Image (cartoon, grey):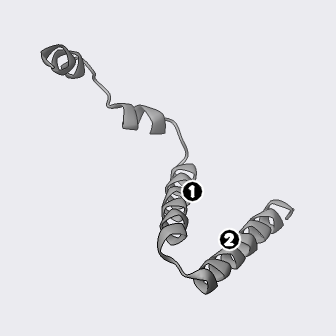
Amino acid sequence: TADGRAAAEKIETPPWEEIAEGEAPGHLSLRAAVGQLMGAVAQSAHTANDEQQARIVDIVNNARREIYGILGED
């Protein structure tokens, strides 16, 4: 609408830049990687056969264990 366009023109910083403002680059990379992983897993729920889904579950479970292993490091 015209009102919406007028309001959008008043915004100096786009919302997607505001969300990232002040965040460490590593945090943003992690967020992007998780989003991409979620997309791939969601797609596999619709397209993978039973054997592929079992392999994907193993990969996700192993990744979770590895992440906790990293968090447990000194």
Q: Is residue 37 left or right of residue 51?
A: left
Q: Is residue 20 left or right of residue 2?
A: right
Considering the image in quadrants, where does the C terminus appear?
bottom right
In three-dimensional space, the C-alpha distance between marks 1 and 2, rounded to whole angstroms, equals 15 Å
Find residue 55 and report its horizontal and vertical position in percent.
65, 82
Amino acid type of the residue that numbered disc 2 sits on in the rendered structure: Val
Task: Name the residue beneath numbered marker 1.
Answer: 30
Considering the image in quadrants, where does the N terminus appear?
top left
Task: Name the residue beneath numbered marker 2.
Answer: 60
Q: Most extreme residue toward the top, as rendered? A: 3
Find residue 14 and report its horizontal and vertical position in percent.
32, 31
Q: Is residue 64 left or right of residue 6?
A: right
Of marks 1 and 2, the one in the foreground: 2
* Residue drawn at 51 percent across, 56 percent down: 35
Res. 21 visible in picture: no
* Residue drawn at 74 percent across, 66 percent down: 64
